[in-house]
Image (cartoon, rainbow, N blue to C red):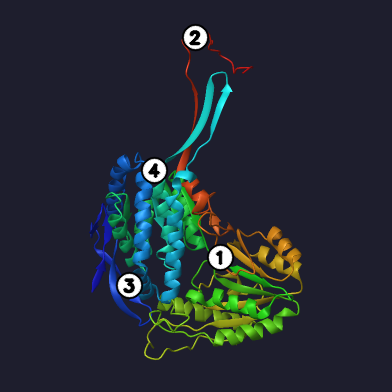
């Protein structure tokens, strides 16, 4: 059985690790590999390699950095199919969905290829007699990323290309549930000409996470995961004096107004709720049906949910694969049961789904619950699975109150044909990313990704301009070059004239 090793200082290594965790095939329920779980000594080795590499990489030219990233971009495109199959085999998502996350991650690499523009400073001539002022940004040093299972290549690509383009070196701790694609990317970096030690991968569990958060040689940590862990990462990392951006969980609402095209809305809600088996931080998990739209919307959503083809992700005929673990399958089923027990109407029940030939796989079918209220557990909690709940509201104002009353603020959407309603919605909701007739409003790489409230801890969103700001710090230089005539006198007070 294959063992997934760490990647430190340009080579695969087992380091000090003696513990392993299983890597499952979610479609069969069988273990397909083992992954090493790092000890603190492995984190120390990765940081030491990154620190050595920073001595030269931090001073490398922007031209050299961007050449590596242009090469990486081409290699990501060339190996897209191979990486998609690795992701589908370990995560369970369908091949096309895996390709989609590779493409979206590659867009961040493309943004990083233009880092010369993103790092441009400002210059002010003659701010006082013979004095000029300008600013520039410099890398932090060794930085780290801790990333989730649900997007094993895209979320890390939100982090390390920007960090590396800015001159930092990087230690990645990916999810131990689907670790292999991170090592694949490490080899692509090497093929692209990245010096050894600039990009390192350390696999592991809480031991590795705490080792990163506590390590004095790491300047900044980027995290994406659940809200409780995001809060923990932010508190522990900042207590250790680090910059931390920690993106947490979500309960994304889509508001459907009576003037919306219900077929269009239902098509997109179905894809947004059940794509990737609902295991997306930007998945729509709550539909807010307004007024007379409710009954008709539920009927259309039910028909579309029942038509979803569920099966192994490697089969391109399927729309939805399994969830990541047996525990995830049981959790989704338990929320359907608790919703029903607390008064919701189960319109589509996916708990008993069996996929022929894959009876031991971690499959759970799409489920749809109607007449859910904000006091129910199925509404309050982040289920992270193929479960869509419908909450009813009398009008747009009540729908906005529902959205704003939820502690999460990652993403939301409104479906309407009325521009005034859309504008009122986008200005009043307390959510970071908003779609108008777009169910998953993930911004392009040149905008920053991030939510509000319990969906984000720290002052920086991820990738785009805020990513550049996070991975660098500014210097402002005020300079004078005196003439031979040194008649300008030094003063103990601030100058009162130019």
Q: For mark 2, what is the residue?
A: 486
CB contact under 8 Å: marks 3 and 2 = no
* 168 sits to left or right of 288: left
Q: CA distance from mark 3 to mark 1?
A: 26 Å
Q: Residue at x 47, y 42 (%)?
A: 119
Q: CA distance from mark 1 to mark 2?
A: 63 Å
Q: Can you tell which of label 4 and label 1 is closer to the viewer?
A: 4
Residue 250: which numbered mark, if any?
1
Q: CA distance from mark 2 to mark 4?
A: 38 Å
> Who is closer to the viewer here, 181 or 398?
181
Q: For mark 3, what is the residue?
A: 23
Name the element at disc 4.
Answer: helix
First of labels 3, 2 by sequence position: 3
Residue 260 x, y percent position in the rendering: 70, 75
Residue 465 x, y percent position in the rendering: 52, 49
| The C terminus sits in image quarter | top right
**Where 296 sits versus 373, above or below?**
below
């Amino acid at each position: 059985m294959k063992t997934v090793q760490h990647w430190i200082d340009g080579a695969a290594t087992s380091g000090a690790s003696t513990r392993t965790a299983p890597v499952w095939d979610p479609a069969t329920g069988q273990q397909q590999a083992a992954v090493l779980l790092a000890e603190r000594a492995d984190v120390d080795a990765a940081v030491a390699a990154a620190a050595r590499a920073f001595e030269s990489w931090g001073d490398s030219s922007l031209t050299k950095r961007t050449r590596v990233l242009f090469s990486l971009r081409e290699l990501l495109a060339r190996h897209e199919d191979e990486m998609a199959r690795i992701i589908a085999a370990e995560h369970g998502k369908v091949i096309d969905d895996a390709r989609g996350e590779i493409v979206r991650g590659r867009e961040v690499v493309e943004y990083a290829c233009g880092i010369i523009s993103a790092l441009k400073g400002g210059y002010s001539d003659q701010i006082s007699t013979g004095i000029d002022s300008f600013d520039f940004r410099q890398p932090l040093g060794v930085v780290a990323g801790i990333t989730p299972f649900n997007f094993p290549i895209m979320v890390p690509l939100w982090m390390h290309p920007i960090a590396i383009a800015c001159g930092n070196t990087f230690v990645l701790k990916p999810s131990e549930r689907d670790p292999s694609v991170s090592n694949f990317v490490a080899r692509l970096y090497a093929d692209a000409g990245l010096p050894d030690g600039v990009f390192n991968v350390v696999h592991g569990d809480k031991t590795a996470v705490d080792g990163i958060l506590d390590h004095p040689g790491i300047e900044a940590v980027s995290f994406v995961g659940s809200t409780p862990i995001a809060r923990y990462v932010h508190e522990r990392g900042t207590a250790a004096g680090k910059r931390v951006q920690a993106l947490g969980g979500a309960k994304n609402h889509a508001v459907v107004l009576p003037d919306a095209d219900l077929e269009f809305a239902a098509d997109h809600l179905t894809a947004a709720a059940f794509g990737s088996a609902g295991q997306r931080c930007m998945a729509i998990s709550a539909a807010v049906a307004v007024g007379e739209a409710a009954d008709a919307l539920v009927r259309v959503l039910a028909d579309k949910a029942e038509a979803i083809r569920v099966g192994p992700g490697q089969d391109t005929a399927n729309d939805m694969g399994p969830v990541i673990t047996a525990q995830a399958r049981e959790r989704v089923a338990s929320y359907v049961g608790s919703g029903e027990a607390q008064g919701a109407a189960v319109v589509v029940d996916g708990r008993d789904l069996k996929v022929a030939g894959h009876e031991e796989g971690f499959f759970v079918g799409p489920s749809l619950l109607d007449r859910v209220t904000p006091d129910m557990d199925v509404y309050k909690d982040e289920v992270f699975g193929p479960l869509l709940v419908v909450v009813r509201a009398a009008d747009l104002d009540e729908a906005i109150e529902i959205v704003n009353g939820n502690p999460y603020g990652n993403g939301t959407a409104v479906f309407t044909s009325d521009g005034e309603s859309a504008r009122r919605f986008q200005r009043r909701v307390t959510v970071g990313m908003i779609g108008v007739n777009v169910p998953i409003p993930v911004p392009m790489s040149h905008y920053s990704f991030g939510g509000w409230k319990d969906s984000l801890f720290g002052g920086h969103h991820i990738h785009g301009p805020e990513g550049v700001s996070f991975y660098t710090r500014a210097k402002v230089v005020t300079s004078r070059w005196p003439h031979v005539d040194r008649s300008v006198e030094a003063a103990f007070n601030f100058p009162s004239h130019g």
